[in-house]
Image: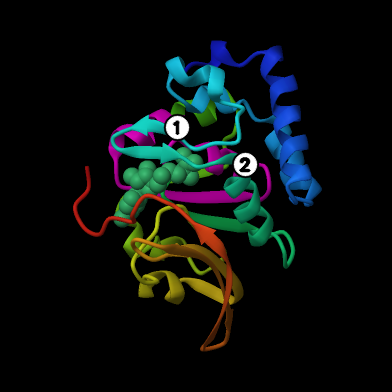
Amino acid sequence: MMSSRIGGKSKRSGELLAKKLQSEGISNTAVLQAIAQSPRHIFVPEILAHKAYDNTALPIGQGQTISQPYIVAKMSELLLAAGRPKSILEIGTGSGYQTSILAQLTDKVFSVERIKALQWQAKQCLRAMDLHNVAMKHGDGWQGWQSKGPFEAIIVTAAPASVPPALLSQLADGGRLIIPVGEQSQILKIITRDGDTFNEEQVEAVRFVPLVPGDLL
Ligand code: SAH
């Protein structure tokens, strides 16, 4: 995972991936452009680099996965559906790939990860991409990041059994939370806040690693 691995060849691969996602129904041009421009191969282990532009999830170590490009694009598009948020809270930095897409779509990204080693690698990748508008926290995503809130947009890339109350309370009025919820079977939800009312919409069935409560690694 080094800057020397960002090259011209990946540009063409990114563009092809964006075309594929467009053919699968992603229509937000800012999202497609971010996908086209991002070197996904630097976010995966070197031995899997040849699969980096396939539309699949891949293991990134520590029992975690880099999300499938389609779902990264889909969640980003849903997050932007009501307009461009000024800042975004992301729970589950993982490889940092989703973070890098978000960083191209907003002014500031706040990202929380419980596994220190993954957070460190993600930081290197974002630096290699020259993205400097991401603040990271080594912490428990169930608690959100209260001191930086409220947030117009929150995205969760690991699945809790139920929606963490802290994330609802850190959602700004009119804000949107995109979150997979469930254990064996999970459903992607959009939760929008209207004063003290939270409206929920179900998008599609998904499969994420669990949002683990408690202890940090
Ligand atoms: N968007 C990431 C997805 C990574 S997988 C990517 O595309 O690479 C989900 C991540 O959520 C993992 O890195 C996992 O360590 C993290 N995670 C799980 N439970 C968490 C918690 N309670 N707080 C913060 N991060 C958590």
User: Element under label 1?
Assistant: helix
What residue is disc 1 on? 123
Compare residues 68 and 98 and report the one nearer the observer: 68
Q: Which residue type carries mark 2?
A: Ile
Q: Which residue is mark 2?
A: 101
User: Is label 2 in contact with label 1 (beta carbons under 8 Å)?
Assistant: no
Residue 149 lies left or right of residue 195; in this view the side is left
Q: Say if 213 sits above or below 55 in the image.
A: below
Q: Quadrant of the C terminus?
A: top left
Q: Position of residue 43 (x, y in %)?
A: 49, 28
The quarter of the picture where residue 100 lies is: top right
- Range of residues picked out in magenta: 94-123
Where is residue 133? Give x, y as percent: 57, 42
Q: Is residue 137 above or below residue 201?
A: above
- How dense is the environment of label 1, judged by Cα within 10 Å: few (below 14), some, or many (20 and up)? many
The residue at the point 77 percent across, 44 percent down is 22
Q: Residue at x 36, y 71 (%)?
A: 162
In front: 49, or 82?
Answer: 49
Determine the residue located farthest toward the bottom in the rendered image.
196
In magenta segment, residue 168: no
Please tell me which residue lies in front, 93 or 188.
Answer: 188
Q: CA distance from mark 2 to mark 1?
A: 14 Å
Q: Residues within 10 Å of mark 2 (few under 14, many from 20)?
A: many
The residue shown at (35%, 34%) is 118
- Please report the residue visible at 73 percent of the width from the left and 47 percent of the height from the top: 24
Query: At which x and y percent is residue 205?
Result: 52, 61
Identified by mark 1, the residue type is Lys
Which element carries disc 2, helix, strand or loop?
helix
First in sequence, mark 2 or 1: give its number.
2
Task: Name the quadrant containing residue 93.
Answer: top left
